Image: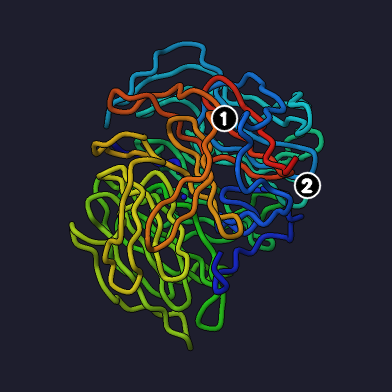
Amino acid sequence: MRYVFQAAFVSILWIVPTALADDWPQWLGPQRDGVWHETGIVQEFPSDGLHVKWRVPIGLGYAGPAVVGDKLFVMDYQQVDGEVENAPDHIVDFEGVERVLCLNVESGEVEWEYQYPRDYHLSYPSGPRCTPTVVDGRVYALGAQGDLTCLDADSGKVIWNRRLTDDYKTKSPVWGFAAHPLVDGQSLYCIVGGPGSVAVAFDKDSGKELWSALSAASQGYCPPMMIRHGGRKQLLIWHPESLNSLDPKSGQVYWSMELQPGYQMSIAAPRLEGDYLYASGIGNVGALYELDQGKPAASVVWRGTPKNAVYASNTTPIIDSGVIYGVDCSSGALTAARIEDGRRLWETMQPTTGGQRRASHGTAFIVKHKNGYFLFSETGDLILANLSPQGYREISRFHVLDPTNECFGRPVVWSHPAFANRCAYVRNDEEIVCVSLATR
């Protein structure tokens, strides 16, 4: 299954203007590290369950929400014609309207919406994939077929937009544009495609191209990521042929390492801990790289084998104290592996499919909070658990919403939650839900 939806370390610096601790302004949170810092959060769910503050109807979409201040931003798709038929490599034609919605975080009331007609020609066509990126009062939204739009966060007014497939003479990848846009200073970084333009930097205020770089047979699905190492910032771009480090100002390639996942599925973002960078994908393709401390350069420490490492796909793993915690795309199990050599420590299906048997692309989205973790399962459950080298210990579980999509005959929900205002914001293809996680 080719899934693209995807998924804090002191040495990582995601260059985004400082957000309040209780904001979630983009995919994986304020620093793009999957870490939630808010205080006053439950350490165990109440015996009578979590309090649901509101439920609001929504359309199709894999795209998770972003939350800034009193506003929530999310994309969806209003289907007009066509049927959802999910199968690997099966292209479906859909007619409908793609939307960007702004909701009030307290009530769920829609404050504004921006919509445009957009036919889909995709495999697994159920809506947009990308979480909006919200910076300096502007919302950057990337649709499944390559519509890139900058909107005023207060009013929804269009500031600028581009159709990436037209501007760069490329086409949507099989499973749609899914690489969440990244803002760093004045630049908006996107994975685009086309000759010499797998990665493109735009001026975030005007949409004007600043530079373009890299060529590959497919652009893939991995979001652009920013690190600081070797004395400078490095923009990481993983397309289906290689993992690349670029100068964020010019697009010049600092270093490049061959890393070719199956089916052109470069998806899960690379993860950095100290001097070590880990990246992996479907087909038992993964590697640990050591980064040079004095300059932008990398060398291979080890490459994965079928019996070690974690080969993430749908979701981006987390590295904590020398241990990789991620969902293996082949087994569908949450798996722990040592970063030093890739040796697997344990695995469990409990927080993914909840079953006992292997299930390809079993999914749980992982967010660290203080000494514990929140996991959102493909079964629609929000889970509070402890993860350690010794094993997985589940503390609490609450069923938030029902799975409305499908994978290999099993029901799934594949959308990354947002955590803000002492709440979790979760969606499927029918509703978006606000669940309080505040201590009572």
* Residue situated in front as seen by the camera: 340 or 408: 340
Residue type for callout 2: Gly
Question: Where, by quadrant of the figure, is residue 278 drawn?
Answer: bottom left
Work out whether mark 1 precedes mark 2 in sequence or the reverse, and give the earlier one. Answer: 2
**Element carrying mark 2:** loop
Q: Position of residue 387 (x, y in %)?
A: 45, 56
Residue 265 appears in view:
yes
Question: Where, by quadrant of the figure, is residue 37 drawn?
Answer: bottom right
Q: Position of residue 66 (x, y in %)?
A: 65, 42
Q: Position of residue 194 (x, y in %)?
A: 40, 49
Query: From the viewer's perspective, is residue 342 above or below residue 41?
Result: below
Residue 161 appears in view:
no
Q: Quadrant of the C terminus?
A: top right
Question: Where, by quadrant of the figure, is residue 215 drawn?
Answer: bottom left
Residue at which label 2 appears: 137
Residue type for callout 1: Arg
* Residue situated in front as seen by the camera: 317 or 98: 317
* Residue situated in front as seen by the camera: 93 or 83: 83
Q: Position of residue 195 (x, y in %)?
A: 38, 53
Q: Residue visible at 39% across and 74% down?
A: 255
Q: Nearer the viewer, mark 1 or mark 2?
A: 1
Q: Which mark is residue 427?
A: 1
Q: Residue visible at 72% across and 60% down?
A: 17
Q: Quadrant of the N terminus?
A: top left
| Residue 390 horizontal side relative to residue 302, left or right | right
